[in-house]
Image: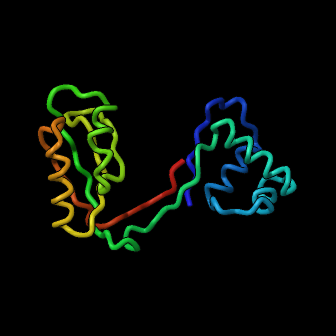
Amino acid sequence: MAVICTRPDPLGMDDIDEAIIRCVLRNARATYAQIGKAAGLSPSAAKRRLDRLVATGAIRGFSALVDPQAMAWHTEAFVEVYCTGNPTPAELTKALHDIPEVIEACTVSGAADAMLYMLARDIPHLEQAIQRVRSTALVDRTESAIVLSRLLTRPRL
């Protein structure tokens, strides 16, 4: 599992909060006893602190990191999107939202308007998904780079 973490007020966090965050980044399913041990707290104090970090938005959520191979989606690609006109990020998000093969989408600097990370079963499936991206009214063209092998994957902070 992964933990989505932000620091809305860096001065409001102390070493104990940071120890809790480090612990749940390593294992989002850690028990309160394990979190407490890592932070020097009792399990009940660790629960209160973790709950506070969630309530204040310092930890925005917990998610599972699923191995794409387990889903039998073996083909990964990074796709640059070049838009027609000047759509807002919200408009582009709405246009891409219903394409499940788009795992991540970001606006970027440079010539492209956005960068997508896409996942598919195989090349024909990827081609169909990219065609669905291209068929949206906001997209003029795309350029793709298919992932050959993963060199490094780290949990996100």
Q: Name the residue furthest front.
A: 98
Quadrant hosting residue 101: bottom left
Instruction: Pick the residue in front: 67 or 11.
Output: 67
- Give the residue drawn at x 37%, y 72%: 69
- Give the residue drawn at x 28%, y 36%: 92
Q: Is residue 68 above or below residue 98?
A: below
Quadrant hosting residue 72: bottom left
Q: Position of residue 29 (x, y in %)?
A: 65, 63
Q: Quadrant of the N terminus?
A: bottom right
Instruction: Pick the residue in front: 29 or 18.
Output: 29
Q: Position of residue 16 (x, y in %)?
A: 77, 45
Residue 50 as seen in the image, left or right of residue 66: right
Instruction: Pick the residue in front: 134 or 37.
Output: 134
Q: Is residue 136 above or below residue 85?
A: below
Q: Position of residue 41 (x, y in %)?
A: 85, 53
Q: Position of residue 49 (x, y in %)?
A: 78, 45
Q: How is the image coloured?
A: rainbow
Residue 108 as seen in the image, left or right of residue 63: left
- Give the residue drawn at x 21%, y 61%: 126
- Give the residue drawn at x 77%, y 59%: 32
How many circles with numbers are drawn on the protein? 0
Quadrant hosting residue 15: top right
